Image: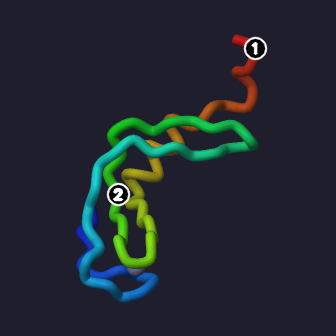
Amino acid sequence: MIDLKTCPTCGSRRIRRVRRNVTRTSQGREFNVPNLTFHECPDCGEQVYSPEAMERIEACRPKRDDAAA
Ligand SMILES: [Zn+2]
């Protein structure tokens, strides 16, 4: 897990690691990723996802073919 000290967008040193439920949109459908850990900058709102976080988002992303279940 990376631990950012400065925001890559605005350079703020207040960026911090948070863990919360996030809502993402894929192909017009919203889906939730519970308890996702990522970095968020309080100054510019930038959200930085580590490779691990991206994997969790992908794991939660609804598959195109499993509609009508
Ligand atoms: Zn920032």
Mark 1, other Cα within 10 Å: few <14 / some 14–19 / many ≥20: few
Query: Is 44 placed above or below 1 here?
Result: below
**Residue 26, how many percent across, how many down?**
67, 44
Q: Nearer the viewer, residue 46 or 68?
A: 46
Tag 2: residue type? Phe
Q: Quadrant of residue 56?
A: top left
Q: Nearer the viewer, residue 19 or 55?
A: 19
Q: Residue at x 37, y 52 (%)?
A: 52
- Residue 49, percent across and down? 42, 60
Q: Which residue is mark 2?
A: 38
Q: Is residue 49 left or right of residue 26?
A: left
The residue labelled by disc 1 is 68
In this rendering, position of residue 52 left or right of residue 23? left
* Residue 39 placement (x, y as % from top left): 33, 64
Q: Residue furthest front?
A: 43
Q: Report the amino acid beneath label 1.
A: Ala
Q: Please, is residue 15 above or below residue 9 in the view?
A: above
Residue at image location 73% in from the left, 20% down from the top: 67
Q: Quadrant of the C terminus?
A: top right
